[in-house]
Amino acid sequence: MRKPIIAGNWKMHKTRDEALQFIFSVNVKVPNKTYVETVVCPPAPILRDLVKRQGDHLRIGAQTMHEESEGAFTGEVSAALLENIGVDYTIIGHSERREHFNETDQSVNKKIHQALRYEIIPIVCVGESLEIREQNETDAYVSAQVKKALHNLSETQVKNLVIAYEPIWAIGTGKTATPEQAEETIKTIRRVITTLYSPAVGDAIRILYGGSVKPGNIDDLMAQPDIDGALVGGASLNAQDFLTLVEAAKNAS
Ligand code: 13P
């Protein structure tokens, strides 16, 4: 039985005041974390503000982190600092980071190792472009991304991380993958992990869907047997929509 997760990726949205307003309206309404994991990933400068007000059931995640422990990396944030301020999750390898900030399969792999060293749960993003989908190369492309991301990770480490399948063509476009398309690729990812590790790991790992998830499509996505939740951009900015998504995930479990 895999516990569902709804993670909100705020990207470069909200000021501190807006974030606090959001947190005060959701932190007491978030369902019990025994049934669903609810995560908000704000911009780095306000992580600590939200951790302090997360309440009993909401958890806070970063949107990225650096793979080195410390050093001359101007503007970057270490896993040690994230752990120190009480952050429990971090997104790694989001397609926007891969596209605009030179994140590669190799740096994604290093970041996962580093996050796990500090007991931060990585939410590892993979997903294909429209061009790759139209060439019918999605399975091969996404499988290769997963294998490179998980390089040299142990069975126990892999069980503890979360994968998010986010087709690039569905991000912020209003074009959601159909539940069947999302299910098919997520099933492929689970099969890859089963082959790399064991049926037990393939069965245990949580795999989310991301890309234009909204209150109107969450039920159909959650009804798919291999989809364990969602990584949500736009709809996570609105407190009511976000809570609706979390309730839907809880009810589907
Ligand atoms: P949207 O939900 O806005 O399409 O964003 C998806 C995403 O990139 C989450 O990480």
Image (cartoon, helix red, strand yellow):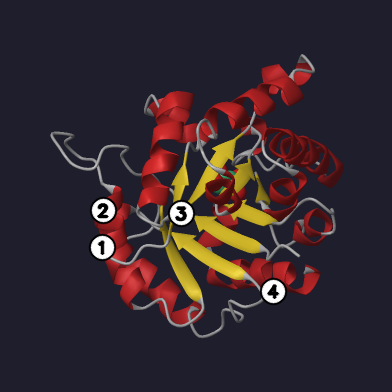
Work out whether residue 242 or residue 191 is closer to the camera in this orientation and state it.
Answer: 191
Quick one: which residue is furthest to the bottom in this view? 28
- Whether residues under marks 2 and 3 lie with C-beta atoms below 8 angstroms apart, the answer is no
Amino acid residing under circle 2 = Ala
Q: Which residue is mark 3?
A: 10
Sequence-wise first label, 3 or 1: 3
Q: Give the spatial CA distance, label 2 vs label 1.
A: 6 Å
* Residue 198, quarter of picture: top right
Crowd around label 4: few <14 · some 14–19 · many ≥20 (10 Å):
some
Count all numbered tags in the image, as a single digit.
4
| Quadrant containing the C terminus in the rendered view | bottom right
Q: Which residue is mark 4?
A: 247
State left or right for residue 29 relative to residue 53: right
Can residue 12 be seen?
no
Work out whether residue 222 or residue 217 is closer to the camera in this orientation and state it.
Answer: 222
For mark 3, give the secondary structure. Answer: loop
Crowd around label 2: few <14 · some 14–19 · many ≥20 (10 Å):
some
| Quadrant containing the N terminus in the rendered view | bottom right
Q: Which residue is mark 1?
A: 84
- Whether residues under marks 2 and 1 lie with C-beta atoms below 8 angstroms apart, the answer is yes
Sequence-wise first label, 4 or 1: 1
Amino acid residing under circle 3 = Trp
Q: Which residue is mark 2?
A: 80
Q: Give the x, y percent position of residue 74.
A: 16, 36
Q: Which mark is drawn over residue 217?
A: none
Amino acid residing under circle 1 = Asn
